[in-house]
Image: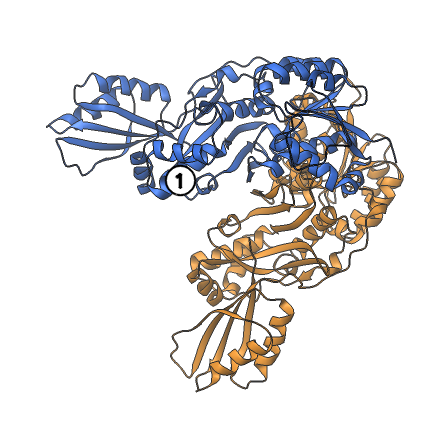
Chain colours: A orange, B blue
């Protein structure tokens, strides 16, 4: 039997604990599959005294993750602390400088510094693997980087934040407004300390930017992701969408358009009976589309101890097997800076607005749409019990630019009450 | 740039043509991702004169696939002929003996001879890759072998024959009997020359046996797959199932039970609103369950030129990247012969039978079930216009042994008209 592969684990929260459990429970299975034993030599976390329900006594303890990353008895630095800066970044840089392979669950770190880290690792012949950073236990990085490597990728879509999907699903099923369900989710511990990471779409946007880099051979460009959170999704829109057989999801979409790379993370409407529309609660789903393979749908748990640790161990066992890939599927130095194309791919849109209930109001709206080049598929004015007229419009395929043009025009009509809502209907 | 990786392709049907197209169309993309150019040096097929719509003039032609497999200018023998014996087997053996890597879409060959081929390849340091052999373009071999390598796999399920899924879906949507839809599918060219490969569950059974070997570290045991085709599925059962929110699928299930490895390919009932239940027409779905990851669902095109060629190219690019795995995810010599456990895992069952319409008939049936240890969840006697009484029963969880015991008992009651139907309700 060859020498063991030695892990140094930084971060012993939910995921770190899960990795320790798998290494301890499945030593034989891992050695059989990986071709060599995998063992933990050292660990690091903020609080040594915490009871984590796992026996850490056989491992060296390092208070400083940077020191852990440099230990000569560590082959793979396993980074499970999180955060784009601070100890996670310092320790990952130290690990690469010290010639270690890196396995990480840290989407924020890679979304912000992935390009440079990958270049440095590849210059030293080291790998950075991050299956656990995107969609938890779903092997989506592997499916995209390896399983679909023969395809020109045409589009990547995903529901990749379980908290948001939980909130939207619960709003619909319980008929409750956003604020109430958000408070509920916070009470259940589902929401990050900084809620905008979840409900602002930042966490899911980090993940999308990593998928886009692999899919299109472009440098990770998180800053170019068009981000819109779920905090303005109303129960009224959820109800109206349901009436039309649609459902609102916080959907990430990356696609190469004629104008460049479009990356969006925003509330979108999808058919309620599509795989994305059917996705319940905290589950994740990623849809990969390629010119040969067509559409591949992957579904599973997007977070949690077991699923995320499973993804970490897949990367570890790949390294044990001798699989050595470029971080983003081709040499980092060859990745090109993408031209960011915001809102370029056309789609049908859902518009909901409230008009003053007076003659000619609807005609003014229709005229503005026509002038903006937006053609109407369906329009409905529905029941109301005051002097206002709620109006729903579904457009034919059009660009977001045209929609924004129309929205600006609406304001000038003098017949609008409040702000109109505009949601993209993503073709799936 | 390193030396090109040279392919010899045997078989230029749908899939072979698709592979040629990808290599020609995406040469730069493949070289960027694989780290070296991939080129075709030689091809082989039965009919040289056929117009395949691709330019083969740059490749050497070999009438004999065995000669192709031995060519010194071939690094990977790509076997796309099919068939468990004959030229496919001879050429694959020759390729391995000549020290070539093998990429194949041939499920029958591996289901019957995979163990020996894998041992011989591994003894020579060669790899056999077969992503295209199971579920077309879905990267399920990769997901199971690599993506879930840190898991003890608890169950593998799949709808892996698009023809059967098409027939069952169409029977339900059009309300047509099996024979008529089967004839339709034959007319559309959806059915293999030997229809039992499809509708008898053999093709899907081959695939299941390969997944089971990877999942459980057991030798491929196709002979131990409990096979039942779809040819006895009646429109009546499809209707009754739909009434209960269930749908009939030809479902493969492999799981390790207390009594050994259970492998079944049979018509099963699943909830109509589950991912498996929702699966339309010719699409494939594989469900992988592991102790850490929970449930992962993969969906995509299970056949066709593009999807299957995509899977072939994933294997080729893996080899270009230097990824070298044991055929079944651990050394073939270490795979153990499984104890075959037929029908061991308990489940609820659906029973439909017709009774003579006379006093005490139902009581006799209920008594037989009780004596067999089968407890009833729901029972319904429904409308009839002659002297018979159709009866539907859904049992609580029980074993197939107990169900078979009850079926034998029914025959002795003297109140049965015709044969009862018994279908497993697979918990998903």
Q: Residue at x 42, y 44 (%)?
A: B273
Write down the chain letter for disc 1: B
- Name the residue carrying label 1: B170
- Residue A241 position, x and y percent, is 47, 62
Question: Badge 1: how crowded within 10 Å, few (<14), some, or many (20+)?
Answer: many
Looking at the image, residue A253 lies above or below residue B59: below
Question: From the image, which quarter does the C terminus of chain B lie in?
Answer: top left
- Residue A122 position, x and y percent, is 85, 40
Q: Nearer the viewer, residue B338 or B115?
A: B115
Q: Residue furthest front?
A: B49
Q: Is residue B397 left or right of residue B41?
A: left
Q: Nearer the viewer, residue B97 or B330?
A: B97
Q: Residue at x 47, y 54 (%)?
A: A272
Q: Is residue A38 left or right of residue B263?
A: right
Residue A123 sits in which quadrant? top right
Question: From the image, which quarter does the N terminus of chain B lie in?
Answer: top right
Looking at the image, residue B122 lies above or below residue A80: above
- Residue B369 position, x and y percent, is 25, 23
């Amino acid at each position: 039997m060859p020498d063991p592969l030695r892990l140094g684990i930084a971060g012993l929260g939910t995921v770190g604990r899960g990795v320790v459990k798998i290494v301890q429970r499945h030593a034989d299975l891992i050695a059989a599959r990986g071709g060599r034993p995998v063992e933990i030599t050292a660990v690091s976390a903020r609080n040594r005294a915490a009871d984590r329900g796992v026996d850490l006594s056989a491992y060296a303890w390092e208070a400083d993750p940077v020191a852990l990353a440099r230990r000569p008895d560590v082959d793979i630095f396993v980074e499970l602390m999180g955060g784009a800066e601070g100890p996670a970044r310092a320790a990952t840089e130290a690990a690469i400088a010290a010639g270690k392979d890196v396995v990480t669950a840290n989407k924020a770190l890679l979304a912000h510094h992935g390009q440079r880290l990958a270049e440095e690792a590849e210059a030293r012949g080291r790998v950075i693997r991050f299956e656990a950073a995107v969609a938890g236990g779903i092997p989506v990085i592997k499916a995209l980087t390896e399983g679909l490597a023969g395809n020109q990728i045409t589009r990547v879509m995903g529901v990749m934040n379980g908290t948001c999907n939980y909130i939207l699903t619960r709003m619909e099923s319980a008929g409750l407004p956003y604020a109430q369900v958000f408070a509920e989710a916070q009470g259940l511990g589902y929401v990050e300390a900084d809620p905008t990471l979840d409900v602002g779409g930042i966490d899911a946007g980090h993940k999308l930017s990593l998928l886009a880099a692999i899919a299109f051979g472009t440098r990770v460009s998180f800053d170019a992701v068009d981000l819109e959170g779920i905090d303005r999704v109303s129960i009224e829109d959820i109800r109206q969408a349901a009436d039309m057989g649609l459902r609102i999801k916080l959907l990430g979409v990356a696609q190469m358009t004629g104008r460049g790379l479009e990356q969006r993370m925003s509330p979108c409407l999808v058919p309620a009976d599509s795989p994305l529309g059917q996705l319940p609660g905290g589950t994740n789903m990623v849809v990969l589309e390629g010119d040969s393979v067509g559409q591949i749908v992957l579904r599973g748990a997007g977070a949690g101890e077991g699923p995320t640790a499973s993804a970490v161990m897949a990367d570890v066992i790949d390294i044990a097997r001798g699989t050595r890939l470029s971080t983003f599927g081709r040499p980092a130095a060859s990745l090109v800076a993408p031209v960011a194309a915001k809102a370029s791919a056309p789609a049908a849109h859902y518009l909901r607005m409230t008009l003053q209930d007076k003659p000619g109001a609807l005609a003014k709206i229709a005229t503005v749409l026509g002038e903006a080049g937006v053609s109407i598929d369906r329009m409905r004015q529905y029941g109301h019990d005051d002097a206002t007229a709620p109006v729903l419009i579904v457009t034919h395929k059009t660009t977001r630019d045209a929609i924004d043009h129309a929205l600006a025009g609406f304001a000038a009509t003098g017949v609008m009450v409040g702000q109109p809502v505009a949601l993209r209907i993503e073709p799936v």
